[in-house]
Image (spheres, rainbow, N blue to C red):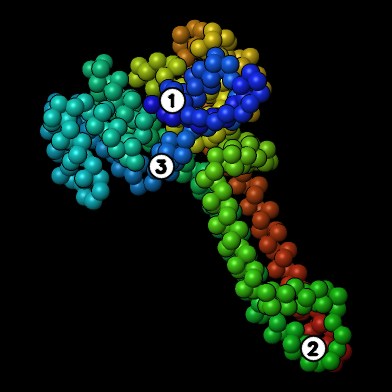
Amino acid sequence: MPVYEYKALDTAGSASRGTITADTPAAGRERLRESGLQLVEFDATRFHRKGQWTLRTQRPGRREKVAEFSRQLAMLLAAGVPLVGALDVLIQQERGSFDSVLRAVREKVASGQSLSDALAEHPRWFEEIFSSAVQVGQMSGHLETSLRELASFMRERETIRTRLFTALAYPIILSLVGTAVVIFLMSYVVPQLLTVLEAAGRSLPAATVFLKGLSDFVTAHWLALSLGSLVSIVTATASYKWRPVRRKWHEAQLAIPLLGPLIRKAVISRFAQAMSLLLGSGVPFVESLRLVTRNTQHLILARELEQMETAIQNGSDIAPTLADSRVFPPSVVHVVAVGQESGELTKMLVQLRDAYGTEVSLAIGKFTATLEPVLIVVMSAVVGFIVFATMMPILEVTRTLQ
């Protein structure tokens, strides 16, 4: 059971700190409020956060292997191969660390342990959502169906992740290459040209004087600038692992033009994928919310899902609870609320997943189509200014000689 740290004020106004175990953050907060405490801070302990971080940074290669494992295991089970025999077949074609994981899972299953429990012992490879869906599939007698749905879920999720990475990678690479070109020009090419121009004894134009000042600054302080950039990157990376910093960054992301709508649609698409998978596998709605909350990467989404869970447990409607949602637009809130009341939530979430999968593709196209020309124009303007500032005095000397 997760462990949470809290800071609270008692009825006398005195501050106190401690830890509490609870199934969910919402349940832990409720227990503390019932004991008369007014919460100031509430967060997962360092140990629990470490586990969450491991799950959320699962390597792409591992995700692909797990998806392939799920597809092939479902195929073998559907063909009538016993579970242990199917695991033996899959072990024969694996190498490396995943081979060791499958051998450990196989030994546990052969000794009488359930497949879901055996998979849950390897959270670096099998997420909590994965093992929970497998558990429900075993209990219902439709394990191969659950495995096929898991493989489809992981493939769709990886497709969205790849599209997002591609959309963000190109502008980042273009910016880095452009910056490297500018640094090379300012630190190597420009100083040599300006040295020749100064030796001619002529006054330099204002643009050239400005460029010379920048070039001299970069040349004289290149070591300090490099160290400062490195320290900034290391500091930002280390700070991102701190939960409040990640939360602030996730809030800021949603407010960035073009990027904010893209991230919001991707988050909603992933939510709909995970919820439709779990509900379709037979996991109860509240438990599905808990699993998605614990495994989501976006902390703003996690906070709003906790609010949704609390509202359901208190018998409240979902729509008023998420009226001021930063992630879910009113249409999505209404779909979830109506689906829960009508008993067709799984069907509506599948429709929501398909619709937002298309929305993500369109948003990525709009993002790249808008950002790439802007970056090209900016880089062209910077390089063009450097060329103009260095060529202008040369052209003036040539005009004078003529």
Q: CA distance from mark 2 to mark 1?
A: 73 Å
Mark 2 vs 1: CB contact within 8 A: no
**Which numbered tag is attached to residue 198?**
2
Q: CA distance from mark 3 to mark 2?
A: 58 Å
Mark 3 sits on what residue? 54
Rendered residue at 49%/22% (across/down): 28
**Which numbered tag is attached to residue 148?**
none
Find numbered disc 3 in the image and state the secondary structure of the residue it sits on.
Answer: helix
List x then y, in percent, for residue 129. Answer: 37, 29
Mark 1 sits on what residue? 21
The foreground one among 48 and 272 is 48
> Can I make out residue 25 in this image?
yes
The tag earlier along the polypeptide, 3 or 2, is 3
Q: Amino acid at mark 1?
A: Thr
Rendered residue at 79%/84% (across/down): 394
The tag earlier along the polypeptide, 3 or 1, is 1
Q: Amino acid at mark 3?
A: Thr
List x then y, in percent, for residue 25. Answer: 50, 25
> Can I make out residue 270 in this image?
no
List x then y, in percent, for residue 219. Answer: 68, 77
Mark 3 vs 1: CB contact within 8 A: no
- Is 3 positioned to the left or the right of 71 in the image? right
Q: Residues within 10 Å of mark 3 (few under 14, many from 20)?
A: some
Tell me the quadrant of the picture where the N terminus can be found.
top left
Q: Amino acid at mark 2?
A: Glu
Rendered residue at 68%/38% (across/down): 255
